[in-house]
Image (spheres, rainbow, N blue to C red):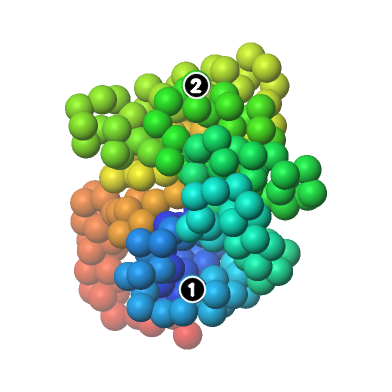
Amino acid sequence: MKFFVDTADTNEIRDLAETGLLDGVTTNPSLINKSGRNFLEVVKEICEIVPGPVSAEVVAVDHAEMMREAEILRKIADNITVKVPLTLDGLKTCKALTSDGTMVNVTLCFTANQALLAAKAGATFISPFVGRHDDIGFDGMQIISEIRTIYDNYDFGTQILVASIRHPVHVLQSAMIGADVMTAPPAVIRQLFKHPLTDKGLEAFLSDWQKTGQTIA
């Protein structure tokens, strides 16, 4: 499963990229706003840090304007993935862009039927929001399972990009279901490293090493 980080914080992206774990980055208008930086400048910098797909979202709601914005976005770098909403105009834009060789991430997906439409429109990635589904009392991971079954039934090439991940269990469940990609905030990715027994074991090893009075030199 590919690991994307969901942030526009270039310092966080650089730090995580050094681990070799990052396969891409997702951004959205809210994350850009949180960064406090110019949209095009921050996206360009992210594309220079990470060679994999970097999702940059259009903010228009009609097809013609989406295409105009997409034309600007895809000129930023070769690894730009244009992000569009799962609406009728968004899918029209998806079809036009992917037919022209541009990667497209269809976002704000909340049902398997919507994911089916995105795949038929040629989406590179579909982004089902599991956490937001959980927030209103539904099982977000059930949607991932349904999409996996549908895509496998018809051999769709669209990659399932699990979004709105809240905690490490979402990452585990995504991997077990067979999602292609997960995108998570930096804090959640860092939680994947953590386990109390790892910390306890390391503490014991270091304590025993100090007792030897040796150094590695």
Q: State the residue at coordinates (35%, 44%).
A: 165
Element type where label 2 sits in the image: helix
Judge by depth and name the residue closer to the eye, 8 or 30.
30
| Left or right: 22 in relation to 171 | right
**Is 93 placed above or below 8 here?**
above
Who's the residue at 78% across and 50% down the image? 101
Q: Within 10 angstroms of label 1, few (less than 14), some, or many (20 or more) residues?
A: some
Q: Is 192 above or below relative to 212?
A: above
For residue 140, what is the image quadrant? top left
| 125 to the left or right of 175 | right
- Local crowd size for mark 2, using a 10 Å CA cut-off: few (<14), some (14–19), many (≥20): some
Question: Which amino acid, mark 2?
Answer: Asn
Mark 1 or mark 2, which is nearer the start of the sequence?
1
For residue 15, side relative to residue 181 (left or right): left
Q: Which residue, given by chain and number where applicable, does mark 2 sit on?
A: 113
Marks counted in the figure total 2
Q: Amino acid at mark 1?
A: Phe
Residue assigned mark 1: 39
Task: Verify CB contact (< 8 Å) between mark 2 and mark 1.
Answer: no
Name the residue located 23 percent from the left edge and 63 percent from the top edge: 203
x then y, percent, for residue 209: 30, 71
Residue 52 visible in the shown view = no
190 left or right, relative to 176: left
Spot occupied by residue 196 in the image (x, y as percentages of width and height): 21, 51
Rounded to the nearest angstrom, the CA distance separating label 2 from label 1 is 32 Å
Going 40% across and 31% down the picture, which residue do you hit?
A: 110
